[in-house]
């Protein structure tokens, strides 16, 4: 089963970025580690643009990962027609932007004005972030210095 999550940006929390797969911290925080320092340096605090770039970067990373998986499978199983003839096809299903919390997400992430990241564990059927449990808060500096995420 997929680990779903949603991400919000402080001062633009009505826009919730949805990620269908790999929503656990080790699947999300590496993308934020790459995006947030570059965005802070290049644009500063701009919640609307950060939300847009967050969604675009998550999609781009997902496409890159899927293409790499296809290459790996073709190399590992060169005589298997299921993989040998397989071509990458973007599915347009794995990401979205919504105004409501999805009831089946396992994690929520909130990017704060200081470019920190709050990681929440979410209950089934969550309607508001106040119902979630804060698991960890990462400062931007901690995020950048981290070698792995759990």
Image (cartoon, grey):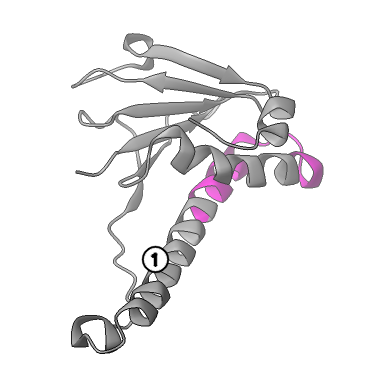
Disc 1 on helix, strand or loop? helix
Magenta stretch secondary structure, dominant: helix
Q: Position of residue 57 (x, y in %)?
A: 54, 53
Q: Position of residue 127 (x, y in %)?
A: 26, 19
Q: Please give the count of numbered marks on the rendered protein.
A: 1
Front-most of 118 and 143?
A: 143
Q: Position of residue 37 (x, y in %)?
A: 73, 40
* Residue shown at the point (25%, 32%) measured from the top left: 102
Q: Position of residue 126 (x, y in %)?
A: 25, 19
Q: Report whether 36 appears left or right of 95.
A: right
* Residue shown at the point (50%, 57%) measured from the top left: 61
Whether residue 55 is in magenta: the answer is: yes
Where residue 92 sits, quadrant-wise, is bottom left
Vertical side of 119 occupied by 22: above or below: below
* Residue shown at the point (45%, 62%) measured from the top left: 65
Whether residue 102 is in magenta: the answer is: no
Magenta region, residue range: 40-56
The residue that label 1 is drawn on is 66
Q: Report whether 135 appears left or right of 57.
A: left
Graded by Cα atoms within 10 Å as few (under 14), some (14 to 19) or many (20 or more), the crowding at tag 1 reads: some
């Amino acid at each position: 089963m997929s680990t779903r999550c949603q991400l919000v940006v402080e001062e633009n929390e009505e826009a919730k970025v949805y990620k269908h797969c790999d929503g656990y911290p080790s699947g999300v925080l590496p993308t934020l580690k790459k995006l947030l320092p570059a965005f802070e340096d290049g644009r500063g605090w701009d919640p609307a643009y950060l939300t847009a770039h967050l969604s675009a970067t998550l999609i781009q990373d997902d496409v890159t990962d899927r293409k790499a998986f296809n290459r790996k499978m073709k190399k590992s199983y060169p005589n298997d027609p299921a993989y040998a003839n397989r071509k990458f096809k973007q599915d347009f299903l794995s990401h979205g932007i919504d105004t409501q919390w999805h009831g089946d997400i396992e994690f929520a992430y909130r990017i704060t004005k200081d470019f920190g990241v709050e990681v929440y564990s979410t209950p089934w059927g969550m309607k508001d972030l106040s119902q979630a449990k804060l698991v960890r808060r990462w400062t931007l500096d901690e995020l950048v210095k981290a070698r792995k995420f759990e």
